[in-house]
Image: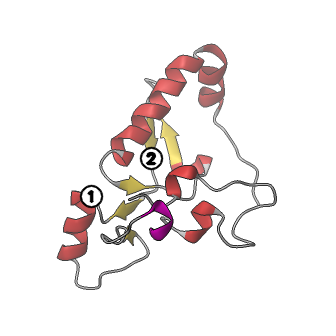
Amino acid sequence: SKATVLSSEFIELARHEPLKLARALLRCFRSWASAGFLLDDFKAQQFTLDGRGDVYLVDGPSLLRAFPVGAAVYRATSHHRQKNNLAPPPSDCATNADCPSTKAHHACGVAGDCEAGARGAPESAGLC
């Protein structure tokens, strides 16, 4: 695997204005997560930092079909690709265990899905 390379600007912001950087990261994540998107492969190279200190996602996230944008895109495409448009949980689930995780490797549900010692992301578990 490649080593993570951070820009000198990012390092300076982290060193001297860590709260500003934290807020910029939260704004970036909120901009797409609150609209029903899921990023499942975090890498530093997927983000960029502008001169004002704002962080932007460069590599587009997957859609969650349970949200309006994901449902609209799914209906509008004829090929109904599953890879980047994740299905909502079944509507007849009675407990959280009945609902699938967003993707198996997010929840570390199967041996070999995650690195040794890694825990699954709690937000990836299915919820009713």
Q: Residue furthest top?
A: 16
Residue 98 picture location, percent across and down: 46, 70
| Magenta-colored stretch includes residue 41 | no
Q: Secondary structure at mark 1?
A: loop
Residue 69 left/right relative to 94: left
Q: Residue furthest front?
A: 94
- Which label sits in the foreground, 2 or 1? 1
Q: Residues within 10 Å of mark 1 (few under 14, many from 20)?
A: some
Q: Nearer the viewer, residue 51 or 85?
A: 85
Q: Amino acid at mark 1?
A: Phe
Residue 109 picture location, percent across and down: 64, 68
> What is the CA distance from the residue labelled 2 to the residue labelled 1?
20 Å
Residue 106 picture location, percent across and down: 58, 62
Residue located 68% across and 73% down the image: 110
- Does residue 96 sit above or below 79 in this rendering? above
Residue 101 left/right relative to 67: right
Q: Nearer the viewer, residue 94 or 122?
A: 94
- Whether residue 50 is visible here, answered yes or no, is no
Q: Which span is picked out in magenta?
A: 95-100
Residue located 44% across and 46% down the image: 57
Q: Amino acid at mark 2?
A: Leu
Say whether marks 2 and 1 touch (CB < 8 Å). no
Residue located 46% across and 61% down the image: 96
- Which quadrant of the structure image shows residue 92? bottom left
How many numbered discs sit on the rendered protein? 2
- Does residue 23 sit above or below 82 in this rendering? above
Residue 80 left/right relative to 10: left
Residue underneath mark 2? 57
Residue underneath mark 1? 67
